[in-house]
Image: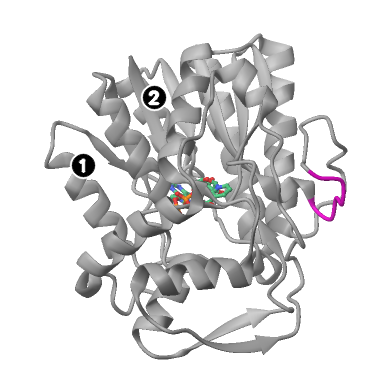
Amino acid sequence: MRVLITGGAGFIAFHLAKALQKRGDEVVLLDNFNDYYDPEIKRRNVADLQSSGYMPLHVVDILDRDSMEKVFEDTRPETVVHLAAWAGVRPSIEKPELYSAVNVTGTVNMLELAKKFSTGCFIFGSSSSVYGGNTKVPFSEDDPVDRPVSPYAATKRAGELLCHTYAHNFSMHITCLRFFTVYGPRQRPEMAIHKFARLMYDGKEIPVYGKGDSRRDYTYVEDIVSGIIGAVDANHPFEIVNLGESQTITLLEMITCLEEALEKKARLRFLPDQPGDMEVTYADISRARRALGYDPKTPFREGISRFAEWFKSNQSRTAGSC
Ligand SMILES: NC(=O)c1ccc[n+]([C@@H]2O[C@H](COP(=O)([O-])OP(=O)(O)OC[C@H]3O[C@@H](n4cnc5c(N)ncnc54)[C@H](O)[C@@H]3O)[C@@H](O)[C@H]2O)c1
C-alpha cells in the first residue's frame, strides 16, 4: 500500500514510517521542516529512515495548495496519514492564527486533495485535548467535546468536524484518532518528559505548574503506531477513536520514574497553573479495542526506561534542543 504521511519528519511519523516500511508498505514523507523545534532533529529523523530503505520526501507546506496537488499527482496515495500540525497547547494561546491556519485550513487542503484523488483511507491525527475541562473519566468518544480550553484543542476538534463532513458528503473513509500524550525515543524536545530529562541532565530546575497532581494518560509511541496501523487496516467509513494506555500518572510520579530511569535527581520549582492545561487526561479505549484491535502493551515504567536509554545514548544529539 502507498501511504503518504504528512508531518513525515516529526516524532510520531518517524515511528509510523518505520513500522509501515518494515511490513512492506510504500511510504512517502511530506514535511515543511518548520522551526517549532530544531529542524535539524527532523532532518535526522528523515535521514535515519532513508538509511534503511527508499523513502521519498517532499519538502512542502500543506498550506501551499498547488505544490500539494503536484505531490498527489506524483504520489497517488492509497492512504493519507495526516499528522502535520502545529502541536503544543501553551504556544497556541500566543499564536492562535497560525494554529488555525495550519491545523484547520491545512486539514481542509488535505481533505480536498484526498477527495480529488480518490484516496481510499484518510487518518487524521487528533488529540485528547478536545476533551477540554471534562471531569468525567475515563474520557469516552461519546462525551461532549464542545468546551476546548486552548486554541490547539479547538483546531483539532475543528479538524474532526471537517473530517466528518467529508466522510458524510463524499463517502470518504476517514478515521480521527485522539492521541493521549505520546512519549518514547525521539519525543519532541519541548514535551514534558523530554524537556525534564534535559533539565535534570543539565542540573537545572524543573518548572512544575500547579501542585504536581495533574494526571496524564501517557501513551508509548509504539502503541500509538499499532493503533494508527490498526485504523489504516480497518479502514472504517467514519470513526473517532481514543488511543491511550488507559492508565493515569501524576506529574510528580512521572518525575520520580524519570529520576529512577535516568539515575538523576530532579530539582523542582513550583509555579502557578498555566492557562490551557488540563487537570486530567484518561482514555476509555474500549472502542479502539473493538474497532481497531488495539491492545497497548507498554507499562509506563518500561516505556520510560526505553526513553531514558535512548536519551542517554543520544545525549550529544539532543543537547541544547529544548
Ligand atoms: N505527541 C503527542 O503527544 C500528540 C498528542 C496528541 C496529538 N498529536 C498530534 O499528532 C501529530 C504529530 O505529532 P508529533 O508529536 O509527532 O509532532 P511533530 O511536531 O514532531 O510532527 C509534526 C510535523 O508536522 C510538520 N508540519 C507542521 N506544519 C506543517 C505544514 N504547514 N506543512 C507541512 N508540514 C508541517 C512539522 O515540521 C513536524 O515535523 C500532530 O498532528 C499532533 O497535533 C500529538
Residue 41 visible somewhere in the drawing: yes
Identify the residue position indicated by label 2 in the image: 72
Q: Where residue 255 appears, x then y in whole percent?
A: 53, 72
Q: Where residue 227 appears, x then y in whole percent?
A: 50, 29
Q: Where residue 147 appears, x then y in whole percent?
A: 87, 50
The N terminus: image quadrant: top left
**Which numbered mark, 1 or 2, is in the foreground of this view?**
1
- Applied colour scheme: one colour
Decide which of tag 1 and tag 2 comes sooner along the chain.
1
Secondary structure under tag 2 reads helix
Q: Residue at x 15, y 31 (%)?
A: 54
The C terminus: image quadrant: bottom left
Which amino acid, mark 1? Leu
Bin the neighbour count of mark 1 within 10 Å (Cα to Cα): few under 14, some 14-19, many 20 and up. some
- Label at residue 238: none
Q: Residue at x 37, y 67 (%)?
A: 261
In depth, the one of 104 and 283 nearer the eye is: 283
In depth, the one of 228 and 38 nearer the eye is: 228
Looking at the image, residue 115 sits to the left or right of residue 55; the answer is right
- Label at residue 49: 1
Count how many numbered circles sit on residues in the image. 2
Q: Residue at x 66, y 29 (%)?
A: 241
Q: CA distance from mark 1 to mark 2?
A: 21 Å
- Is ligand 1 less than 8 Å from the beta carbon at label 1? no
When the figure is inspected, residue 131 is found, relative to residue 322, above or below; the finding is above
> Residues in magenta?
132-137
